[in-house]
Image (cartoon, rainbow, N blue to C red):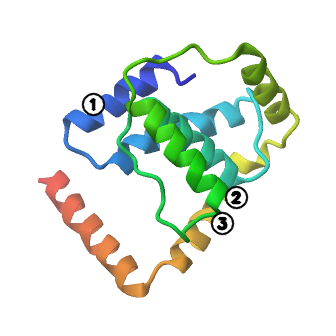
Amino acid sequence: MPEQQTVERAREDAREGKSPSTQAGEFVREEMHHIREGKHGAASTKQAIAIGLSKARRAGVKLQAPKKGKTSPGTRKKAERDYEKGQARSHRKPSRSRSRATSQALKKEGKSAASHRSLSRQAKSAARKRAPSERRAAAVKAGRTRSRRRS
């Protein structure tokens, strides 16, 4: 269950017209904090990010599932299911036993998934997979928003 503060920050991002991935970033950040403070662990940085994105989708962030071929079919199905759950009106209380099992499994995992080093490594490997033109476009856009924020 995401913290109320996180949900509020994501809603604020939505009101400001920020992209769904930016809104979801709040949930990923929360997940990293949870791992760092020892609430639970994660097998890898990728898993930690996936947990955050899943929480975001379930909280109603309009973040679509990745396209076919981008991730494994199981991950994609889970993302679709999370998205539908988040967009649905009725929210059933999560199953206590399943929730407990998930937390217990995550508690056995390591804490290094949220370290600065592993996050940096994950970001670099993700960037390498993108085309140079995509990376350049992102840098140009970042520069544009940076200059807009300064004035």
Q: Are the residues at dot 2 and dot 3 in contact (C-beta closer than 8 Å)?
A: yes
In front: mark 2 or mark 1?
1
Residue 12 tag number = 1
Dividing the picture into quarters, in which one does residue 109 lie? top right
Q: Is residue 45 above or below residue 97?
A: below
CA gap, disc 2 to disc 3? 5 Å
Q: Nearer the viewer, residue 15 or 87?
A: 87
Dividing the picture into quarters, in which one does residue 10 lie? top left
Mark 2 Cα-neighbour bin, 10 Å: few <14, some 14–19, many ≥20? some
CA gap, disc 2 to disc 1? 29 Å
Mark 3 Cα-neighbour bin, 10 Å: few <14, some 14–19, many ≥20? few
Q: Amino acid at mark 2?
A: Ser
Q: Amino acid at mark 3?
A: Arg
Q: Quadrant of the N terminus?
A: top right
Q: Which residue is mark 3?
A: 121
Q: Which residue is mark 2?
A: 118
Q: Are the residues at dot 2 and dot 1 in contact (C-beta closer than 8 Å)?
A: no
Position of residue 123 measured from the top left corner of the image (x, y, whole percent): 57, 64
Q: Is residue 140 above or below residue 81?
A: below
Position of residue 29 measured from the top left corner of the image (x, y, whole percent): 53, 40
